[in-house]
Amino acid sequence: MSYRKTLKLICGFAGGSAVLVFAAAAADSRGYFGEQGGERVSRWSRFAVLQAAQPAWTPASHTPTPTGHAWDFNWDKRDPSALINGKKKENATEDPSSEQNNSKPKATRNILLIRHSQYNLSGNSDKEKILTPLGREQAELTGQRLAALGLKYDVLIHSSMTRATETANIISKYLPGVELVRCDLLREGAPIEPVPPVTHWKPDAVQYHEDGARIEAAFRRYIHRADPKQKEDSYEIIVCHANVIRYFVCRALQFPPEGWLRMGLNNGSITWLTIRPSGRVALRTLGDAGFMPTDKLTRT
């Protein structure tokens, strides 16, 4: 077998054990394995020593195991069938299918979650934690990107914290006519104790208790399928904070919410959630900052 063919075969082995395979092949070619019973052992039988590193392939061992958790179509408590079944009908003769059709959402909601731009970390109070000059540049770039998408935005909601408010105000210059709405629920905080835990950030139990309830309330207010009265697809912008956005993503995708800290988001980045009338949720982008030059990227 030629060297190139041997190398291709070796590269087909999984993970670090490919190194062991290559070493075995090299050792065998130099006669390091020696001879057994007066005759050389077949070259490829040498790889028996690697069986511990290369478990036998079976379909079961290479197929991800389902968690057993089915998608909850009533995650936002707006599933039409659940609403009909839980409501007492005033008119017993009304056609249930007609009532369900009238209460069924028809539009798709697009929610663009923007992380605030870089800010002054040395500020003692929220009012002092204003955007840095670079942060203002980042907000300009984000506003330009949102405008370039050519979408018809319905509203621009922002956290009441200074860094988010300033970011939203700069973005709004590129989106004339889009209403600005301030919301205290979107303020930064500790949504839930992360798993695995980290050593550099340890809020106390009271902060998790208070912030978690508030951020969950924000999720329930803003992340849900469209109202049945909504006729056209909507595009809503929410400017807030990394912890809030990461928690929203986990909750919307029905991932374990305690995994929120496993993700990272750049300043001024765009995370795009799509919520279908059926209640299905898709993550179109997570922390997209590809529209920024590399020297403008930060994660503070």
Image (tube, rainbow, N blue to C red):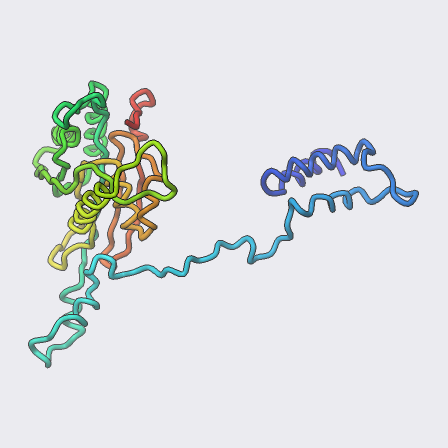
**Where 80 sits versus 281, above or below?**
below
Given residues 101 and 13, the one toward you in this image is 13
Picture quarter with the C terminus? top left
- Report which quarter residue 97 is drawn in: bottom left
**x, y percent for residue 204:** 26, 39
Figure check: 170 above or below 78? above
Residue 237: where, in percent of width, then height?
18, 40
How many tags in the picture? Answer: 0
Q: Position of residue 124 (x, y in %)?
A: 17, 23
Residue 182 position within the rendered picture, expressed as x and y whole percent measured from the top left: 9, 38
Question: Which residue is situated farthest in the bottom direction here?
Answer: 93
Residue lying at 14% horizontally and 77% vertically, measured from the top left? 95
Q: Quadrant of residue 86?
A: bottom left
**Front in this rendered view, residue 142 or 42:** 42
* x 29%, y 60%: residue: 72
The image quadrant that residue 241 belongs to is top left
Quarter containing the N terminus: top right
Q: Residue at x 27, y 39 (%)?
A: 271
Can residue 152 be seen?
Answer: no
Residue 3 located left or right of residue 290 = right
Residue for point 22% across, 30% down: 142
- Residue 236 shows up from this direction: yes
Q: In this rendered view, identify the residue nearer to me: 250 or 202.
A: 202
Furthest residue in direction top, as rendered? 133
